[in-house]
């Protein structure tokens, strides 16, 4: 069995199961945690919990105007990276093909050039994220292994993916092998580190929004 | 043609001019990735070369390799190279059978000991003492060991001989193995393919007759000149791959326009062979040109690499039942963790309640 066979076979099998099990474990564990009953009366500006949850999911996706001057760089890099990743994952023909072969779902791919530009933007953004984390005095103190590992495990698949799409530097087979293996490493780490924000970010905002809405504290 | 005749004498007898030999030598030099300036030297050496003894053994094979090589449509000197080789033993082609054939084999091996080329097609069953493919009461492994010892070099022809091929596919009941894994101490060149390209064998023979050695090999033991690049790199449909134009089914508009077959499972990007450049039947076509993706037949274990119709960007992920099982496991672990957290919290609350009650009682 070659390394590529391993990557496309047993490793993909195991990584998928670990990711699914880990994500469900984390979500279930948080969802079933004991919550204190809210015994206080509703505030004067109370709103519905569902609308509060939805509002918070959307509103927290935009930067606060009062902090915009200080957070502009972070917000811009963050948006560039996340939009780039979405374009790569949802618009790249090989990725759609993977989903189609696994689930039967299919949608049109974006032109290769657009995905290439998105990949470049994402890669540069990720490099800037690391650079900022290493050079910013406060951010550096707040960072731990989880932060750097999560960024690296996102960066390597993007880098190998760009090289694979352009078929440059190394043979196609080698690049394909390392691209798939790096994605599988990302899948395995995803539920257990800060990358778990993939699912927790919206769940957390919704829970907070519902609570704040009842208290009339939603902004 | 006698054993002492040279190829030059044989070509003259057949009316093949030196100019034609030079053209063939130039083509051979190109296919062997040698500069064109080597052509006169190759022609000179070939014309002086004496008839090479070749012993051909067939083990667990389908005879497809031999069919491809002997039915090669190449009418020129390529064919004569095959004629020039003294094929001293080949069970399918020789007239002799039984004990007479075995006697020929013994005599030829003895007479040319240390000089003959040993060609093998088919894999060798090593399980249960090779009982699955006995020849004249002997196991393939015993025959191979004996003849490889006296050979100048061993040619593993076809994927079965090179890597075990289809007989080695899981669960491999016969314990099939490729020649390279079984023969030690002798140079072995793999010429894989299901079947291999006739011109590749010609090239290897020309290299051996000209330089007295086997050509340079890649990590899989294949001649670099023919297996150094992937089919994808030489494919005439490659521009469509670069443009992102893929056939989605074998009969859609893309397929009819000759678009890339990557999404239909073509293994060209990971398969090393010369199919896209040399092609088959005198350069007429090759599988991708005929509208079907490459199966990757010249790579080890190609039969066990999943569906021929799963694209390389896909893979053999888990079935939905296993995914559901993993999710259920996640629910169980998460539920247990939450339950443990609730119990810990209840314990703390009980303790706090007791402390408050004690304080109230004191007050």
Image: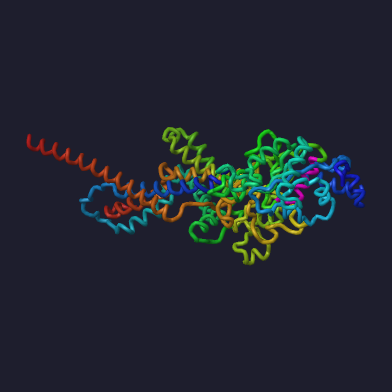
Left or right, B50 with respect to A141, comes to: right
Number of numbered discs overlaid on the protein picture: 0
Is residue B68 visible in the rendered image? The answer is yes
Residue at 73% over, 58% down: B285
User: Would you place residue A131 above or below residue B297 in this image?
Assistant: above
- Is B234 on the left-hand or right-hand side of A90? right
Which of the image's four quarters has the N terminus of chain A? top right
Q: Residue furthest front?
A: B99
- Residue at 63 percent across and 54 percent down: it is B295
Q: Closer to the camera, B225 or B176?
A: B176
Which residue is more in the foreground, A33 or B287? B287
Location of residue A9 in the rendering, given as x and y in whole percent from the top left corner: 52, 48
Q: Position of residue B87 (x, y in %)?
A: 78, 46
Question: Which quadrant would residue B249 be assigned to in this image?
Answer: bottom right
Residue A147 lies left or right of residue B293; in this view the side is left
Q: Position of residue B338 (x, y in %)?
A: 29, 45
> Residue at coordinates 67% horizontally, 41% vertically from top-left?
B143
* In magenta stretch: residue B200: yes
Give x and y (percent) for residue B56.
73, 46
Instruction: Please report the bounds of the magenta region as a residue range.
Output: B196-208
Q: Residue at x 80, y 37 (%)?
A: B212
Is residue B229 among what the camera can see?
no
From the image, give the main secondary structure of the stretch colored magenta.
Answer: helix
Q: Which one is in front, B329 or A186?
A: B329
Coloured how?
A: rainbow
């Amino acid at each position: 069995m070659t390394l590529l066979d391993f990557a496309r076979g047993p490793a993909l099998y195991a990584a998928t199961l670990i990711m699914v099990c880990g994500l469900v474990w984390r979500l279930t564990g948080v969802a079933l945690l004991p919550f204190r009953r809210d015994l206080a009366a509703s505030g004067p500006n109370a709103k519905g919990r569902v609308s509060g949850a939805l509002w918070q999911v959307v509103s927290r996706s935009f930067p606060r105007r009062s902090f915009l001057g200080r957070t502009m760089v972070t917000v811009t890099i963050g948006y560039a990276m996340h939009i780039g990743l979405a374009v790569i994952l949802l618009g790249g023909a090989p990725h759609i093909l993977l989903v189609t072969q696994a689930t039967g779902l299919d949608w049109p791919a974006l032109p290769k050039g657009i995905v290439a530009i998105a990949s470049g933007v994402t890669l540069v953004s990720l490099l800037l994220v690391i650079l900022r984390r290493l050079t910013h005095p406060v951010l550096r103190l707040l960072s731990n292994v989880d932060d750097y590992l999560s960024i690296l495990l996102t960066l390597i698949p993007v880098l190998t993916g760009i090289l694979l799409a352009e078929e440059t530097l190394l043979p196609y087979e080698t690049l394909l092998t390392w691209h798939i293996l790096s994605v599988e490493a990302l899948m395995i780490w995803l539920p257990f580190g800060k990358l778990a924000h993939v699912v927790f970010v919206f769940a957390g905002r919704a829970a907070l929004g519902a609570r704040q809405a009842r208290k009339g504290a939603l902004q | 043609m006698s054993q002492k005749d040279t190829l030059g004498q044989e070509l003259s007898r057949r009316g093949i001019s030196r100019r034609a030999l030079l053209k063939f030598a130039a083509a051979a030099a190109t296919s062997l990735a040698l500069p064109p300036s080597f052509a006169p030297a190759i022609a000179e050496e070939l014309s002086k070369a004496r008839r090479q003894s070749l012993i051909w053994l067939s083990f667990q094979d389908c005879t497809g390799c031999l069919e491809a090589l002997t039915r090669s449509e190449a009418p020129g000197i390529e064919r004569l190279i095959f004629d020039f080789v003294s094929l001293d033993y080949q069970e399918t082609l020789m007239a002799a059978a039984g004990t007479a054939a075995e006697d020929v084999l013994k005599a030829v091996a003895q007479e040319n000991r240390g000089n003959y080329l040993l060609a093998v097609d088919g894999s060798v069953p090593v399980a249960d003492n090779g009982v699955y493919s006995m020849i004249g009461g002997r196991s393939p492994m015993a025959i191979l060991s004996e003849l490889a010892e006296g050979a100048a070099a061993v040619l593993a022809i076809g994927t079965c001989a090179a890597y075990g091929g289809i007989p080695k596919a899981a669960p491999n009941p016969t314990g099939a193995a490729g020649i390279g894994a079984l023969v030690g101490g002798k140079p072995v060149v793999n010429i894989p393919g299901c079947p291999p390209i006739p011109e590749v064998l010609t090239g290897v023979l020309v290299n051996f007759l000209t330089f007295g050695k086997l050509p340079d090999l890649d990590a899989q033991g294949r001649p670099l000149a023919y297996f150094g690049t992937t089919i994808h790199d030489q494919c005439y449909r490659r521009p469509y791959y670069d443009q992102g134009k893929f056939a989605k089914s074998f009969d859609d508009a893309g397929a009819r326009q000759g678009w890339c077959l990557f999404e239909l499972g073509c293994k060209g990007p990971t398969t090393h062979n010369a199919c896209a450049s040399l092609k088959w039947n005198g350069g007429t076509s090759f599988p991708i040109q005929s509208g079907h993706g490459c199966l990757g037949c010249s790579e080890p274990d190609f039969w066990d690499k999943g569906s021929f119709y799963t694209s390389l960007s896909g893979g053999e992920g888990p079935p939905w039942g296993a995914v559901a099982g993993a999710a259920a496991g996640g629910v169980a672990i998460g539920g247990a963790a939450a339950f443990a957290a609730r119990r810990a919290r209840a314990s703390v609350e009980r303790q706090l309640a007791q402390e408050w009650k004690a304080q109230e009682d004191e007050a």
